[in-house]
Amino acid sequence: MRQEYEITLEPLLSVPVERELPLRQRLWQQGWLRKGLILIVLAVLWEAVARYQNNDLLLPSFLQTSAALYDGLLSGELLSKVSISLVVLIKGYLIGIVLAFALTTLAVSTQLGRDLLSTLTSMFNPLPAIALLPLALLWFGLGQNSLIFVLVHSVLWALALNTYSGFLGVSETLRMAGRNYGLKGMRFVLFILIPAALPSILAGLKIGWAFAWRTLIAAELVFGATSGKGGLGWYIFQNRNELYTDKVFAGLAVVILIGLLVENLVFDTFERLTVKRWGMQR
Amino acid sequence: MNAPLQGHTASNLNTALPLLAVDNVSLEYRTPERVVRATHQVSFEIDPADRYVLLGPSGCGKSTLLKSIAGFIKPCEGEIRLLGQKVEQPGPDRIVVFQEFDQLPPWKTVKQNVMFPLLASKTLKRAEAEERARHYLDKVGLTAFADAYPHTLSGGMKARVAIARALAMQPKILLMDEPFAALDALTRRKMQEELLLLWEEVRFTLLFVTHSIEEALVVGNRILLLSPHPGRVRAEIHSHQYDLHSLGGVEFQASARRIHRLLFDEAPEAERELGFADIRIAY
């Protein structure tokens, strides 16, 4: 038979109750630092391969590209190209978002809307947006409008599909709670469905952004300057024709940089302030 | 079976309108293949400040009945009247407290959650809503957590927020659908105690759905027993004399046994064999 026992506990002073992590671990917690490190490693690899290759025309080194990028930014040429592209992109993106929300709101409120959405998305979602460009040029002529048409097409279906599946995933309890408080129609969508489906909507926005960006550069590459002012894609295309490969790389780098910035600053910040803070996403 | 006088209590002897009248209500729900009858011709009346409990085995349609009173499901027969007005759709005069924890929108802090129905139904302006939210959060002891998000709270705290949110609306009747069923036994006991204390203070009218005989006896003052599927009224029983202190007492056990017999054994002679261990105190 074992004995019972009691221990009188003195305050625990000999061991600190909490202590800081060592500096190295704290630094490693920082996402930007880890990602930055990956970028540096990639840049070093690039530089090494380019030097080994030793052919500026095919593969300019990281430093040459950086110099071309720096010149382009300094002369303002790249910046003006970027702003042309971004203006078109944002216009198309916003119109796409508005249409997607109109379509999904219709879909959650009526059976016909649901059928319309599912038919349209299954028809148009697999269709590459760029394939519509020749048609758009025919309808809207050379100019911003045909680009915007194609961009809307690339954003709309991906976002509508994600938003709709997000709406479907909203729990029955939450829906009943909303209706219990007298929320109906637009107010119900605004106050219950959209915040509750925000993780899916954000995923849709991200995909839509990537699709739009991709489509825009491709459109500019293939069809060049619209209305006499070319964007980033045109810049890449032109410099390739003149065999300024370092400038081509600089243009591509800008495309990548903008993608990284939007992903890591805009979307990440928005996620941190919303879905992550609310415990809806890790 | 549908005699309108069944289950009437002394308080119904006056001719005043009951707060809530459920009159011969039958409910059906659809599955893809068939229509299933959930309750059959159920009638009862609830007076102001009643703590009315719907008790029955699972699948007897008690939750469906509550949802119908809340206005989410239309009866296929009979009608539900709130102060003489026929219930047609959900509305903020009947606030529901659900069992599920996800009834609190995760994108709102505790205080915003309590303010939400007040603002959504346009009952109050923002400043007044905020004041009332504070008042009721204070009542359930969550003032310190006013700015926390729901995902950081424990199950019991979430239940308290849901109760504060419902009470803040000052609804004509509070509908609770097994609100404590997802909590652990200790927290559940504590929540029952707090609910009774709140009732002592505010004297709200409560309709409470549960499948636990013990909880029904503790929380309610009148208990409506529903038969197994499809739910029909089996009896109405007084339980105003019991509270948490009567748990385990002789009379309390006798009432529990009586309810058990009414719910599960149609033949009274089975009572002899019913040992204490058989009593479905569903914890």
Image (cartoon, coloured by chain):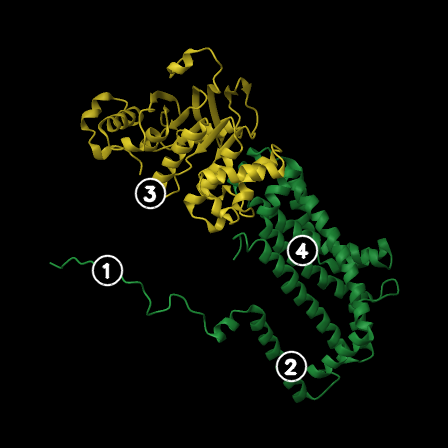
Chain colours: A green, B yellow
Query: In this rendering, do the residues under marks 4 and 1 share a single chain?
Result: yes
Q: Are marks 2 and 4 in contact (CB under 8 Å)?
A: no
As drawn, is B259 to the left or to the right of A109? Answer: left
Three-letter code, disc 3? Leu
Q: Name the subunit of mark 3.
A: B
- Residue at mark 3: B186
The numbered dot on residue A46 is 2
| Numbered label attached to residue A8 | 1
Residue B91 point in image, percent of width and height: 56, 29
For label 4, the residue is: A126
Which dot, 4 or 1, sits closer to the camera? 1
At 51% across and 38% down in the image, what residue appears? B135
Residue B62 locus on image (x, y percent): 42, 29
* Cα gap from disc 2 to disc 3, whole angstroms: 63 Å
Nearer-N-terminus badge (4/1): 1
Of circles 2 and 3, which is in front? 3
Q: Amino acid at mark 1?
A: Thr
Q: Secondary structure at mark 4?
A: loop
Q: What residue is rendered at 54% in x and 23% in y? A: B87
Whether the residues at callouts 1 and 2 have beta carbons within 8 Å, the answer is no
Mark 1 and mark 2: Cα distance apart in space: 65 Å
Q: Secondary structure at mark 3?
A: helix
Quarter in which the N terminus of chain A is drawn: bottom left
